[in-house]
Amino acid sequence: MHLPDCNLTSYRTTPNPQAIFSILIPTWNNLEYLKLCIESIKKNSAYAHQLIVFVNEGIDGTFDWLHQQSGIDYLYAKENVGVCYALNAARTLAYTDYIVFMNDDMYACPGWDKILYDEILSIGHNWFFLSSTAIEPRRNHPCALVKNFGTDIHTFDEKALLTNFESLEMPDWLGATWPPNVVHKDVWDLAGGYSIEFSPGLYSDPDFSKKLWEMGVRYFKGLSKSKVYHFGSISLRRLKKPRGYYIFLGKWGVTQNIFSTKFLRRGKPFDGPLKDQTLSFGNKMNIFYKKLKSAFTHS
């Protein structure tokens, strides 16, 4: 794997002792969405937070814009090093106990952070993985609420979102994986952050969940009242699909789909910490077939 020039320039502000979360936001020439994301965090959060932006390339003016802001920590790479390297580098600037990963094309709804933090305090230990719930303009997965408040930044109806987001309901759900998500810094560090073999990033989300699972984490919960609006992987649409599916299969000996549906039970109503699982004969045959296909396809 070719690693682009990742000589990093970093800028750090004075730490805020009141900050609750360190919010890591990788961005890749997505300035207008990044501005909206940061504005929403500042405007709609109940608590103070540390903001850490990782700028990939920044040829759209992102670097210059951040340089003019106050209270935002950021790192800059001249070439796009992908999400995994970006998150791991951003972690080095984090100073709070809780690490949040948020996409740059997300709008944080009012109170998103208080709901997450209240849940953390209620758990009573650090072995958890929590997600907010995304509102998306189209159905992409079972863990999202579907309501179209705009398919891009030009059609975004902020007023309608703020008027209606609380009325959109679903149960808390199992299988927290996607951002915005939060873990304790000790859990992040023990897992080793996001795995760079998945660079630029596809399939790194379920891989991170699998690493937590192997560590013994069983509290995977998506909180329905903690909401963000998600335009839908604006940056990832520009990427060619890598071999992340088969990397996951080769690394863990199970498909991402089986891990997500059988072990994490992703999208099912939350009913407590997850239980250990054993693979059925049908699961094992499916995995055998996928490995065989991978061997012939990628040999």
Image (cartoon, rainbow, N blue to C red):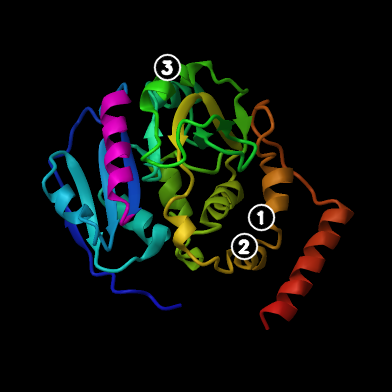
Quadrant in which the C terminus appears: bottom right
Image mark for residue 248: 2
The residue carrying mark 1 is 256
Give the extent of the magenta segment: 28-44
Of label 1 and label 3, which has the lower sequence position?
3
Where does the image place residue 76, in percent across and percent down from the top left? 23, 60
Magenta stretch contains residue 30: yes
Mark 3 or mark 2: which is in front? Answer: 3
Mark 1 or mark 3: which is in front? Answer: 3
Where does the image place residue 37, in percent across and percent down from the top left? 32, 38
Callout 3: 10 Å neighbours few (<14), some, many (20+)?
few
**Residue 20 visible in the snapshot:** no
The residue carrying mark 3 is 163
Of label 2 and label 1, which has the lower sequence position?
2
Residue plotted at (66% across, 79% down): 298
Q: CA distance from mark 2 to mark 1?
A: 7 Å
At mark 3, the secondary structure is: helix
User: Which picture quadrant has residue 248?
Assistant: bottom right
Image mark for residue 83: none
**Total tally of numbered discs in the picture:** 3
Q: Is residue 150 above or below residue 232?
A: above
Where does the image place residue 153, in percent across and percent down from the top left? 37, 40
Callout 1: 10 Å neighbours few (<14), some, many (20+)?
some
At mark 1, the secondary structure is: helix
Say whether residue 277 is left or right of residue 92: right
Callout 2: 10 Å neighbours few (<14), some, many (20+)?
many
Of label 3 and label 2, which has the lower sequence position?
3
Q: Is residue 50 above or below residue 67?
A: above
Q: Amino acid at mark 2?
A: Phe
